[in-house]
Amino acid sequence: MLKQDFIITVGLLQNGSLRQANLKILFERAKDYEKTSFKGLFNFIRFIEKLKKGNSDLSQAKIIGENEDVVRIMSIHKSKGLEFPIVFLCNSNKGMNKKDWQGEVVLHKDLGFGLQYIDTVRKIEYPTCSKIAMKVKLEQEAISEEMRILYVALTRAREKLIITGVRKNEEKELEAKRFNLKNYFNGNKISPILIKNKTSYLDWIEYVILNYELQGKKYEYLDFSVINSNEILEEKEETEKREIDFSKYNDFKKLEEKLNWKYRDEFLTELPIKTTVSALKKLENENVDFFDLTNSDISLKEIVPEFLKDDKITASRIGTITHLVLQKIDFNNIKTENDVREFLQKLVSKNFIKQDESEKISTKEIFDFINSDFALNIKKAKNVYKEKSFCLEVEASRIFKNEDLAGNLLVQGIIDLYYEKENGNLVLVDYKTDFVKKDKNELIEKYKIQLELYKEALEKGTNKSVEEVYIYSLYLNKAIKLF
């Protein structure tokens, strides 16, 4: 044992606490060394000398505990699992590091690597499809990771959290964000496009605050303020100002005309390149603005960490799973309703769906459809095709019902099922799980524009005539002919 009087004497010297801690570590290391085959003071001293020459681990003892009354400076990663009374999150305006997907070669742990294609004949280079796909994947994963890191930072404080950031023109930045929130309105949620375009913690926090502001709400325990640098730094003496009469050198009338000039086809600059059939259906039936729809419907998935996602099974999710079951199931092998239940369990075992989701699916509706007279024609068909995706170019004037509009939209969608008759013509079928009254016209009016686009896309894609178009309502257990 170390003598107590020696420990006390060392503690009275400069940095006494640290010296005492180092002595205790030395004592523990000596005890561990004695447990080996090499024993004795001489061998231990030689061992320490070799460690020093090899720059091995001889670090000092840590005498500051987690509850010490000190100011700690650490990264967000280091703070994980710790809590403090007051926390400063500084430099929150710093953007996300994008170097991982901006180089000549892009690497992904699962997808491999993506390269630039070099055309030696035309002396040009451009990214390959694989590189573009990896860039999108890496960016989504990086944003999700940054969100998780921000969540850690925001949950370290027990009493008060102070977030700081620096901007050149904060008022202009806030106005731009208000404008974006209004134009990319997505209910009470912030559009994923805005989250993707702005990737600093300060931007995300400001979007949340302003989104509450636009809804007429305010955070009860949050104080957001903008402090001008002049309030912190000493004001410099004002230099002498020179007055210049610009009217002598400029024609303000011409200048005003140039500044107020508007592009004749301004509408086309805001028109999205691609949208979905579902978005057009909402435009037609729900009387909503087109641009409020497309931002969440142009194949951009929500960038949300897994631990923040809602596990609630919605009616929309049930409809999606029902479509999946009808896509995968073999109509000829279903003889009883129990066969449908067994098939659902196969999907669960293969991780296509979850157990709680399978319990929400109506096996009776699926069984009744497969054993209906209408499905009998599908079973006898020459060729049957399920879940076929398409892209169709549609005139903007047709969508907005305005002949003066120019330009086209690329519309994408998925056809549930179509089959070929003996005469070579096609029959198109679209499943619907909507709750409806007995009036079939409700479904016809709601989905007419969608099925018209499906029919047009199928005829153009196959060069065959679509003879019949049906909506099959699983809720009504009825096939409804549209054309």
Image (spheres, rainbow, N blue to C red):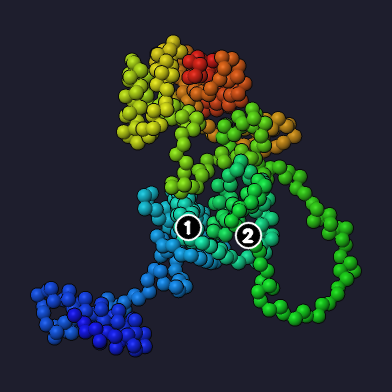
Query: Residue 194: x and y, percent?
Result: 58, 50
Residue lying farthest to the front in this orientation: 5
**Which of these two is toward me, 477 or 360?**
360
Up the image or down, 236 lies above or below 202; here it is below
At x 33% / y 81%, what residue is drawn? Answer: 18
> Which residue is at 75% across, 81% downward?
237
Q: State the residue position of label 1.
A: 155
Crowding near the residue tagged with mark 2, few <14, some 14–19, many ≥20 C-alpha atoms within 10 Å: few
Q: Residues within 10 Å of mark 1 (few under 14, many from 20)?
A: some
SS at badge 2: loop
In this rendered view, identify the residue nearer to me: 210 or 403: 210
Using the image, determine if residue 132 lies above or below residue 374. below
Quadrant holding the C terminus = top right
Left or right: 82 in relation to 19: right
Q: Earlier in the sequence, mark 1 or mark 2?
A: 1
Q: Amino acid at mark 1?
A: Thr
**Residue identified by numbered label 2:** 224
C-alpha distance separating marks 1 and 2: 18 Å
Q: Quadrant of the N terminus?
A: bottom left
What percent of the width, then of the height, locates residue 20? 30, 82
Residue 154 vs residue 180: left or right?
A: left
Query: As shown in the figure, which amino acid type bears the numbered disc 2?
Result: Phe
x then y, percent, for residue 471: 53, 19
* Residue 89 vs residue 283, the one in the foreground: 89
Residue 131 in sight in this render: no
**Residue at position x 43%, y 12% in the image:** 372
**Residue at the extreme left:** 37
Query: What residue is rendered at 44% in x and 62% in y?
Result: 83
